[in-house]
Amino acid sequence: MGPMRVAVVGATGAVGREILKVLEARRFPLSELRLYASPRSAGVKLPFMGEEIPVEALPEGPLPVDLVLASAGGSLSKAYAPRWVEGGALVIDNSSAFRYEPEVPLVVPEVNREAIFRHKGLIANPNCTTAILAMALWPLHKAFHAQRVVVATYQAASGAGARAMEELLTETHRFLHGEAPRAEAFAHPLPFNVIPHIDAFQENGYTREEMKVVWETHKIFGDSSIRISATAVRVPTLRAHAEAVSVEFAHPVTPEAAREVLRGAPGVEVVDEPRNKRYPMPLTASGKWDVEVGRIRKSLAFENGLDFFVVGDQLLKGAALNAVQIAEEWLKGP
Amino acid sequence: MGPMRVAVVGATGAVGREILKVLEARRFPLSELRLYASPRSAGVKLPFMGEEIPVEALPEGPLPVDLVLASAGGSLSKAYAPRWVEGGALVIDNSSAFRYEPEVPLVVPEVNREAIFRHKGLIANPNCTTAILAMALWPLHKAFHAQRVVVATYQAASGAGARAMEELLTETHRFLHGEAPRAEAFAHPLPFNVIPHIDAFQENGYTREEMKVVWETHKIFGDSSIRISATAVRVPTLRAHAEAVSVEFAHPVTPEAAREVLRGAPGVEVVDEPRNKRYPMPLTASGKWDVEVGRIRKSLAFENGLDFFVVGDQLLKGAALNAVQIAEEWLKGP
């Protein structure tokens, strides 16, 4: 395939802006770039390859492009994506609207690249927490066969969008000046707090964010036998998610063997020199394409187990980068 | 026993100041209160029951009191506590200097009150993370028998002392004004970051903070058979520690049964109405004597398992309150 006509829907959002940067940095082969957002944002110009590209109000009908990278929320995708597909575009959707539909591939290219080529016009980009976890878990699963996974997350404000990042900054400022911080983007004020509530609560007591880790890991790995329990917690960081992970494997495993496996895994950077104060952190993983994995040690809870800490940029591998990578692999072909 | 002559060593520190407030709020029966700190702080006056009590430089020898509440670091306690004991005082020490010595009781009164009366002059106050976890885990362990525990922590700056709390605030302010935050009290800048490094790294790849949870839970519970794995993470909160906990039990358990057990547990507040946005958080648990427990749900990783979230004030149940409670129980007698 030659250069593509590409549309970014939700171009002015936190993920949309990162998609532009990733397309530019990776020199994605495009012949035309159209930016769409709500009518409110129409007329805004966003920089791309030295030009200023105007944002258009999203039209009702199909889009005049070959590829749509959509990041404008689930209800918008649900309504519009079928029209874009009918119009002939491949849609890579960052929302959760289609992730669980059996005929829609849900893809982390490093894990299940082959699923891309089964698409029927629509490919789903996974939840950020899941994508970041999958980068570390999949190579270990292939090598040692994961049976049980317990994960506790430290999720950044960016997961709730650009407005939420802004709220964290402005409300932290208010707190420091002796005023009570307010909460609009979050269920409670986030400055100097942690909130164990992301997305809606389900009947089983888990949040939808927590269940996404279970549902999506099963679908991406093609293996529903792994027992996964997650606690998803919002913390006052800006754009990188951290996850404390404990895994029980079927096969014997050592931290050394795990490090060797992860050093050979694409998209993973092993940052595991605790004595030099080097371990994964939002401070170092923000803005980075690779996911940082470290604090790798033998689990004290499981016989064949590992504990580790993984941190990835929520807006990059957790969203924009993974979406662009799916498009790149699709261009390369099966 | 009648009213006591009490000394607070490390009176100007974050824990020391809370000890004064707790003694006052609980009307601890004291006949005299002496405050000690480093010579640098001598002359400072601290408020207590409407008076201003001067801080004295800690003398080399024994102290003229019946009870010493010490919170001035491990090396100071190691050097001085034996002299205070020789001088006839009961020493309740908040450092880790003596916690693992077999003849020194390590006590959370709600768990192992009876151990208080085996003291030989010295009683150790547990690590904050352990004390807060124990409040939720012990009642559940008694009811359902915990076999495996996986815990990931969200630990506040207060665990590193008053200067660390100040650093979090001032460096957050610098960050918001476009300057790079600095780190002296922490291994890396803490504002808008999380740091999976508290206390020194051990040979097995765990930090000492993480191993304290294992060692101290075993000692306090009198049960070394529970397999515990911890990840201890510093987060940008001020004074309440949060912990995401997954437990496998020997006996069948339901969230309803667990809630009932915890509702009857002293020092525990069940905060578990997710649909009303009520769950444990540093925002609500700070300044509170009780430890908040919520997000109680059936584990998806273990057959007989629970996941829950616990938050407690690090300076109170994690330090000052527990120390004063030990003294209160000692006064009541066996």
Image (cartoon, coloured by chain):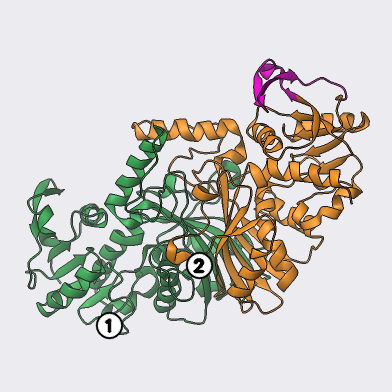
Chain colours: A orange, B green
Give the image location of residue A3, x and y in percent: 84, 34
Number of numbered labels in the structure image: 2
* Mark 1 belongs to chain: B
Q: Residue at x 27, y 80 (%)?
A: B117
Q: Quarter of the image holding residue B322? A: bottom left
Q: Nearer the viewer, residue A159 or B70?
A: A159
Query: x%, y% of residue A294?
Result: 55, 62
Instruction: Quarter of the image for the N terminus of chain A: give it.
Output: top right
Tell me which amino acid carries mark 2. Answer: Ala
- Let me know if residue A237 appears in the view: yes
Asked whether residue B240 is drawn in magenta, I would say no
Q: Nearer the viewer, residue B76 or A205?
A: B76
Q: Which mark is residue B97?
A: none
Neighbour tally class for label 1: few under 14, some 14-19, many 20 plus, Cα within 10 Å: few
> Which numbered marker is on residue B118?
1
Residue at (58% x, 39% y) in the render: A158
* Residue found farthest to the bottom: B103
- Mark 2–mark 1 distance (CA, rounded to whole Å): 29 Å
Disc ID at residue B230: 2
> Label 1 amino acid?
Arg
- Relative to B1, does residue A288 appear above or below in the rendering? above
- The quadrant in which residue B317 appears is bottom left
Residue A83 at x, y percent in the picture:
89, 29
Element at label 2: strand
Magenta residue span: A35-62
Q: Is residue A234 left or right of residue B311?
A: right
